[in-house]
Image (spheres, helix red, strand yellow):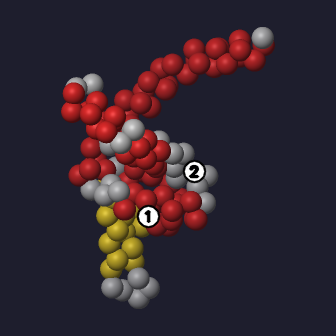
Amino acid sequence: MDYEHTCMIRGDGGRTLRAILDQICNKWTLLVVATLDQGTLRFTDLHHQVPGISQRMLTLTLRHLERDGLITRTVHAEVPPRVEYALTPTGESLIPPALALAGWAIAHAPGIEESRAAYAAR
C-alpha cells in the first residue's frame, strides 16, 4: 500500500474505508453487481436472477449502489413506469476485483472446509 492510501486509512481511523467495504462486501452487493455486468436489467429481472434475495433487500441494495455511484437507475415515462438499472463505469471497475476474490474463494474452498472440519473436531 502506498503512502497516499495509508494516510487515507489513518486520517479518519479507517472509517471511510470500512464504510465502503461494508457496503461492497455485504451479502448481496457483489451478486447484484455481477448480475448487472450482463447488461441493463429491470427490477423484476434482477429479482429473478439473484437467487434468494427478497424484494425488500434488492430494493435496499439497489438504493445503496445508486447512492454510491455504482449503478444508475433510469425511469422511463411509460404506463406502467419502466425502471432499469445499469452499472456505471465505477460499478464496472468493481468486476475485476470481484472476480479475483471469487476465484480465490473457489480455489481455496476445499482447504478452508478442511480447516473448518478440523477446528470443529477439536
Vertical order, 86 against 83 (above or below) = above
Q: Nearer the viewer, residue 66 or 2?
A: 2
Image quadrant assignment for residue 7: top left
> Which one is in front, 33 or 25?
25
What is the C-alpha distance between the residues marked 1 and 2? 19 Å
Residue drawn at point x = 56 percent, y = 60 percent? 57
Give the x, y percent position of residue 74.
32, 72
Mark 2 residue type: Pro
Q: Which mark is residue 51?
A: 2
| 40 relative to 42 in the view: left or right | left
Whether residue 40 is visible: no
Q: Residue at x 41, y 30 (%)?
A: 101
Assign the C terminus to one quadrant of the image: top right
| x then y, percent, for residue 16 | 37, 45
Q: Is residue 71 above or below residue 113?
A: below
Residue 50 spot, x, y in % from top left: 52, 52
Q: Which mark is residue 63?
A: 1
Badge 2 element:
loop
Work out which quarter of the rendered image holds the N terminus and state it: top left
Where in the figure is residue 41, as x and y percent of width and height?
39, 62
